[in-house]
Image (tube, grey):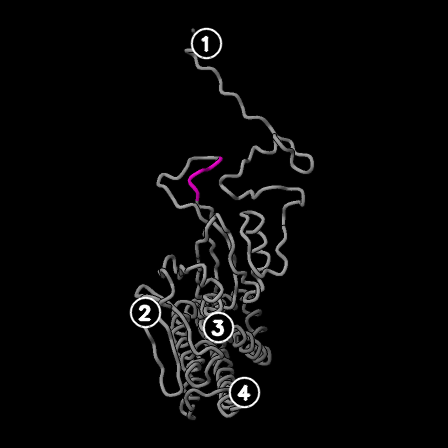
Amino acid sequence: MFITNNQPIILYKYLTKDILKYFLFALFALVILIFFIDFIELFRRSSNKAAVRHLVKAEVFDIINMALLKISGNIQKILPFAALIGSIACFNQWRKKNYYIVCKTSGISLWKILSPILVSFFLIGLASIIILNPFATLLSKKYDNLQTIFFGTKNLKSLSFDTKGFWIKQISKDSYLLINASKINENFINTDVEFETINIKVDSSEWAETHQKLKDEFDLKFFSWLSAIDWDNEVSIGEAPKESVSPSFEIITCLSNVSNNNLVTVSTTISKLEPKITSLVEIYAGANWHEREAYEMFGIHFENHPNLEKLYLPDGYEGNPMLKSFELISREVKPWPGEVDVEGMPEEPESDESVDG
């Protein structure tokens, strides 16, 4: 069989249809295989009461429903493997049927044969991103909710938020509650949402207790950072605040839940006359160096810290560089430990009027 030059479109359609057939077959086989694996795993979890504390008993229909909800997400993951397996199987059949020899004899290059196939796979990938991805995200959330109901979590509360406020999900043995609240805890001085972040302000006496609660009950286990702000009317460099402020230190921490991307900042205010607050190291080990940095930069004492020593500055250094009252030109009066080249301030040029006078 020979192919004339005016028949390449028919050939392209045939070859593309052939390889898509193998691709869909491979995709279907992988989806069915993974579906049964998910079903067996979910069934095992529902049967193993020693490993999983049930909140609601999962029936076989519920397990099948959960396995089906994972299909769209699984398809996204196995698309490249289905394309690879389908292509290998299809090319092998073409080799057995001598398609390559026929095309080469007819003067059709291999790249011309592959070009419509590559375009087809590109369109499939594009459709997966535009159409399948949002659908898979929606079903994934439903799967997570069912997983929480049937299998439970270590913490029975979860926290999320949107434009309508805070949403607290609380699961008991016989109920599933979704609560909308303006505040998370009555002890919090203020709670709001800004830039997709929950901002919580607490009294300094509730500092450690609040972080313990957020970690245990709201699953905010990742400690991102700790920082401080020196609020003062007297500044050594720059302009003083336009409005009078109460001299104080504001301490801010950032916590997060990496599983649902919840981001929470906690802040409190302490007096500059007695700048001390309870350390968070026993709750979050990652707070260790952050508190040491705040100690040397601002002079804030963190009580019960296991090793409250300077982190960056040399032992002979005096003062706290991040204080607004700190004199930056003190190096000229008392040299920094070590060699420092301090340049003087440039002199202002004389005006034309003073020269003429």
Is 234 part of what is drawn in magenta?
yes
Cβ–Cβ below 8 Å for labels 4 and 2?
Answer: no
Which residue: 48% across, 59% down? Answer: 254
Evaluate whether residue 322 shows in this view.
Answer: yes
Quadrant of the drawing holding the C terminus: top left
Amino acid residing under circle 4: Ala
- Numbered label attached to residue 303: none
Question: What is the crowding at mark 3: few (fewer than 14 residues within 10 Å), some, or many (at least 20)?
Answer: some
In front: label 4 or label 2 = 2
Q: Which residue is mark 2?
A: 181
Q: Is residue 45 above or below residue 193?
A: below
Q: Tell me where the magenta segment starts and ends, as one range.
A: 232-236
Residue 250 coordinates in the image, percent (x, y): 45, 52
Determine the CA span between mark 1 and mark 3. 73 Å
Q: Earlier in the sequence, mark 1 or mark 2?
A: 2
Residue position marked by numbered label 3 in the rendering: 216
Label 4 environment density (alpha carbons within 10 Å; few <14, some 14–19, many ≥20): few
Q: Nearer the viewer, residue 309 or 261?
A: 309
Circle 3: residue type: Asp
Where in the figure is residue 86, as x and y percent of width and height?
53, 78
Q: CA distance from mark 2 to mark 3?
A: 19 Å
Q: Marks 4 and 2, Cα distance to the nearest angstrom?
A: 33 Å
Tag 4's secondary structure? Answer: loop
Which residue position is annotated with label 4?
51
Query: Which label's residue is closer to the chain start, 2 or 3?
Result: 2
